[in-house]
Amino acid sequence: ETGVTQSPTHLIKTRGQQVTLRCSSQSGHNTVSWYQQALGQGPQFIFQYYREEENGRGNFPPRFSGLQFPNYSSELNVNALELDDSALYLCASSFRGNSPLHFGNGTRLTVT
Amino acid sequence: GQQLNQSPQSMFIQEGEDVSMNCTSSSIFNTWLWYKQDPGEGPVLLIALYKAGELTSNGRLTAQFGITRKDSFLNISASIPSDVGIYFCAGHDFGNEKLTFGTGTRLTIIP
């Protein structure tokens, strides 16, 4: 059974740039969620995707957007990067119906 | 964003000691989860709790879903070096797609 994989593992961007992060869900899972984890804090919910549509969103501005593809993989896009966007971005997958989330190892984004 | 209150914030213990940590919320959850996160990695699910009052074990780990549905605790017995890491509780509410995470408890084992 393949777990959740994310790419890239690390990324450095400049303020104002755009970034795309990628996630492959665990086999058998059809729902993908994205979380932002700032240093020293717990993960914060960004949004969830199910059947290729956004299915719940946290308190994040519209410059955070996503996609889910027919194979259940997903992308997180962030436009107009700000210094405070520096964080670990975690992708988690689950099977729709309240099953626990399984997380990938994240992408460490640094904005300078 | 909202985070659940975890205590203690950090623990320094000797190998072989038992550990207890808890998590409280101002709102009710229908599911409580406990995760462990090692440096440079994502959170790994340890235990999932689905019913108020439920007591569940996973090896040396035991967790309970509080009766009020606003709290949960995690116990680790006979700690070993690989228990080092940050432990997060998380609550989930039916009809709400997100997990709400706690602030974390950092466990360190003193040689």
Image: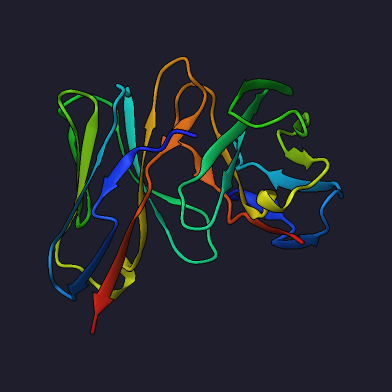
User: Can you give x and y, in whole percent of width and height, for residue B16 in the image?
Assistant: 14, 73
Left or right: A63 as drawn, with respect to B82:
right
Percent across and percent down for residue A1 are: 56, 49
- Whether B67 is drawn above or below A44: the answer is above
- In the rendered image, residue A106, in percent from the top left (x then y), is placed at 62, 54
Classify residue B2 by image quadrant: top left
Q: Is residue B39 above or below residue B99?
A: below
Residue at (87% x, 50% y) in the render: A17
For this orientation, the residue located farthest to the right is A17
Residue A29 showing in the rendered view: no
x 69%, y 22%: residue: A54
Image quarter of the C terminus of chain B? bottom left
Q: Give me the residue at 58% from left, 56% from top.
A: A105
Q: Residue at x 13, y 63 (%)?
A: B18
Location of residue A20 in the rendering, given as x and y in whole percent from the top left corner: 81, 46
Give the image quarter of residue B66: top left
The colour scheme applied to this rendered structure is rainbow
